[in-house]
Image: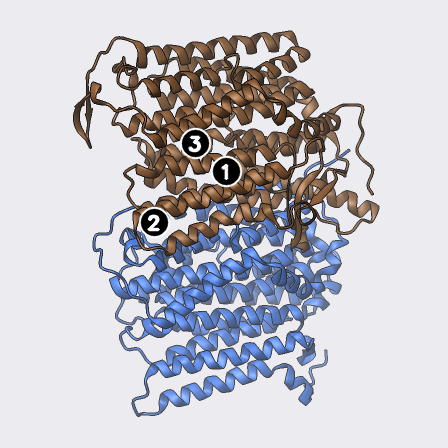
Amino acid sequence: MLEEIFAATQIGFPVLSVLVFLPLIGAMLVWMLKSDEFLIRITGIAITGIELLLTVWLLVTFKSHTAAMQFVEQADWIPAIGISYHIGIDGISVLFVGVTALLSLLTMLFSWDLAIEKVKGYVMALLALQATIMGILVSLDLVLFFVFWELMLIPSYFLIKLWGTGKLKEHAALQYVLYTLTGSMLMLVGIIILDLNYQEVALAQGIQPTHSFDFLALLTVPMSEGKQLLVFLLLFFGFASKAPIFPLHTWLANTLASGPIAISVALAGIKLGTYGFLRFSIPLLPDASRALLIPLSILALVGIIYGAFVALAQSDLRRLLAFSSISHLGFVLLGLFTLNFHGLQGGLLQMINLAFTTTGLFFIAGFLYSRGLQDDLTRYGGLVTPMPALAGFFLVIGLASVGFPGTNGFVGEFLILLGAFKVHWAFGAIGVLGVILGLAYIMWYYERAMLAPPQETVIKNDLKGERPVSTLRDLNPREWVIALSLTIMIFWIGLYPAPFFEMMDASVQAVVDRVSPSTRFVALP
Amino acid sequence: MNFTLSLSSADLLLLLPEIFLTLWICMLLAVDAIPSHVDKKVIGNLSIVGLCATLVTLIWFYINGKTGTLFNGMYVLDPMAIYFKIFIVTSTILVVSMSIESVERFPAFRGEYYFLVLMSALGAMLMASANDLVSIFVTLEFTTFGFYILVAYLREDSKSNEAGLKFFILGAFTAGILAFGISLIYGATGKLILTDIAQAVGEPSAALIAGFLLLFAALGFKIGAVPLHTWIPDVYHGAPTPVTAFLSVAPKGAALAILLRIFFVTLAGFAAEWVWLLVLVAIISMTYGNIVAIAQSNMKRLLAYSGIAQIGNVVIGLAAANKMGGESIMFYLWAYLFANLGAFAVVIAVAHIINSEEIEDYNGLNRRSPFLAFAMLLFLLSLAGVPPLAGFIAKLYIFVAAMKAGLIALVIVGLINVVISMYYYLIVVKKMYINEPTDPSPLTVSPTMTVGISVAIAGTLILGIYPKPFIDWTVHATQMFNHLNIITTTNPFTLPFGG
């Protein structure tokens, strides 16, 4: 049984609840404001800024070297069926919270001077999105988790539908919602089976209460392998369609290419699907995880290679990033389902890394589109001449995303491959092939868009009319802040990852202990 | 059998809510008959006052644990009956409050509209207490009688007339089926009271099975479960919208009270035999209702088909055949009440000004009235089962109960239906929030309507965010089903949870 450190003793106030509900209150505040664009945007930035400051405080107060749940809050919600308001973070979720706070602020900054219709709704939707993501990350009760997981669909739907930029946005919004909803409905069945299994044990041993959806309580009850496999499969649909894992990935490219940059950052940057595997599937269903190690690793490798090959063929930057995401998620999945320390550690770190690199590239894509460049950048060429700083950041972040030594991507992929080689040499070898393909698609695209001799010299845009490429301006100070802060994180993790490992190691070790075949289930108290 | 009637004053007290409401209704009729020009709104407001007083009495009954049986067991007042009565009275209050503005515009409107609504409510309240086959028949017909007139209330409107005729013919036919079923059951067992029948049923005979199937068919007609749903779309479409709203909630709740008594008390021992029937009805109702709803272009028809699907969900709770199934149905009804009545209230408010119920005319509703659009958004999402609204907790409750009974296949079908329903609800949402209105003039909502819709919004949110008191109440009111937890059902849909 994991220890719990309550928020009251650790920091003195319910910090996680504040993190979840502050953006919601902020959204209501924005709703009540007059339609003064400046005021609305500055409120959005202020709220996300306060969130980031709180998160920094949280990260500083967070105790390393322990697997305990920290900043825990617990209250009854629906005791009749064992649902409680139970939230807390450990080494697995703490960095996700940090990343979400940072990315929310950067997204607000990014949107500062975008010409957006209905700014009020946009800022409200972004804040609501942040609140639901925070909720997903801190929930320790599976129904609470599910509530936030479903709620996230509503702001996402409106963001894609109302502020999407691509041609397919009508289709993409509905596709995303229905796809994820189908997955999460099956996940709900899995969650209910977990509860019924708990009830079976509780009735047999005379424990009160007889119902529980509490993650920590569910960890204490044994479960037959057959049932574990069934639940694993049901949860898999939920997590894999959200992540998305090959072959449930078909919504991703449409959504990321059609939605606003903000939704791309949230969906591709914060790897909630694979987080779900690490948070719930693996610890709750250790026998099933072990039994499915080989098929899942193969699925991961297919995803890596498939995503990379399809990315090679893309000419639209956002579609390329979508497929590279599928490839990256393959790496994360490969790492997680090695079920050894290095693999899990690498998988977790890589999820954090991708939050900086993938979103960095999406922001770059956003910078380019805000300058009127259309989806297919390869037909211009030579974009480095008017925009050297942007091209520089593109190169650095791009290389980091495919694991260039010295950047954060290298640390993550190295650990994942180390873990994979321990399982089977072939897994590692195919993984390395994926790294090489990754370098190929990102460099080839960069070469065609940025370095190659200019082809089209005039940008034709429906909204802004015609203008020559040579007049494009380079990054403005606000864009510098966004790109630079991500680059700093990339090199920090790349060169000195020790503080990050210290935070996550004990929790990762707890998961490893949990899945190792020698450990049996913890006896009930 | 001894049919001597001995009514003491203590017995009469048990009938106090009904007696009070009857007297109040008579008074309303008298006020309406005064030839001077009494504003009809006064009668509407008086109806609400009377209903609120009834509600207070019922709550007082519940808190003080007033229970008992009357008329040799024909009429029972147990916590479950009071629970359903409170449900019915609450829905009637909401319906009357949303009627007051819109009924004024009915051609040939008279005060008797409120009289009919309250009479039907009274019938439904009696239905919740019906405990033998004869009282089931009498109260059910009593309830339906008012509706025959209400559905055809728009005398000039051919659709309303058609709906009224359809409803009347099918209703009369159903009454025949019900009477036939009752006679078969009585013939086979010689008993009328539901609890006595449970003991008299030894080995079920063919006549008895046929009897119960006919009984189920008649009640299935009232709740509108497939394949007895055919009247719903036309009647919902043709009837005046407040009547449709009323019809979609109160009689369904009362019929479910009877179904709960029949399946969970009388037939509790035969759960393994009837569960397949309910599983089938649930699956077909949900899937049919949701798929046909996609193609609708009229808001009332859309809500009619979504209502059929919602009843499918409720039947899942019946099929679960355990105490939690009963609890979940009763909780579900509250979630359904607020979301469904709320949605109809928005339809009434919109139709009051633009005189149309077509979904196309909801284009850009957010521009014209952000309040109505937001309310509709909440109600539709609650009907779909999106957290943290009432519909989510209710669906979760039902699914947990069904999983507990091992009906995993049924739950998966139910969840797939959630996804299908999300599709057509989102289409309406898209029209309200994203499409441009053809006529951007703002819509004004009357104060009573605003209050009614706000109550529905509050109910939808409170049941979703803090359902604990309601669930505690439901758990308490269903203690008569405690015996069900001991029975273990075996059915073909049980998942092998071995090892």
Q: Secondary structure at mark 1?
A: helix
> Which chain is displayed in brown in the rendered image?
A
Describe the element under mark 2 as helix, strand or loop: helix
Taking the spot 54% from the left edge, 15% from the top edge, the residue there is A410
* Residue sticking out furthest to the left: A466
- For marks 1 and 2 on the same chain, the one whose residue lies earlier in the sequence: 2
Decide which of A168, B80 is in the foreground and name it: A168
Q: CA distance from mark 2 to mark 3?
A: 24 Å
**Few, some or many C-alpha atoms within 10 Å of disc 3 (few <14, some 14-19, many ≥20)?**
many
Tell me how far mark 1 sits from mark 2, CA to CA: 21 Å
Q: Which of the two labelled residues, at mark 2 and mark 3, occupies the earlier sequence position?
A: 2
Residue A320 visible in image: yes
Three-letter residue code for mark 1: Ala
- Horizontal side of B477 relative to A385 (left or right) equals right
* Numbered label attached to residue A101: 1
Q: Nearer the viewer, residue A235 or A115?
A: A115
* 3D distance between C-alphas at marks 3 and 1: 12 Å
| Residue lying at 38% horizontally and 64% vertically, measured from the top left | B345
Are the two marked residues, 3 and 1, in contact with CB atoms closer than 8 angstroms?
no
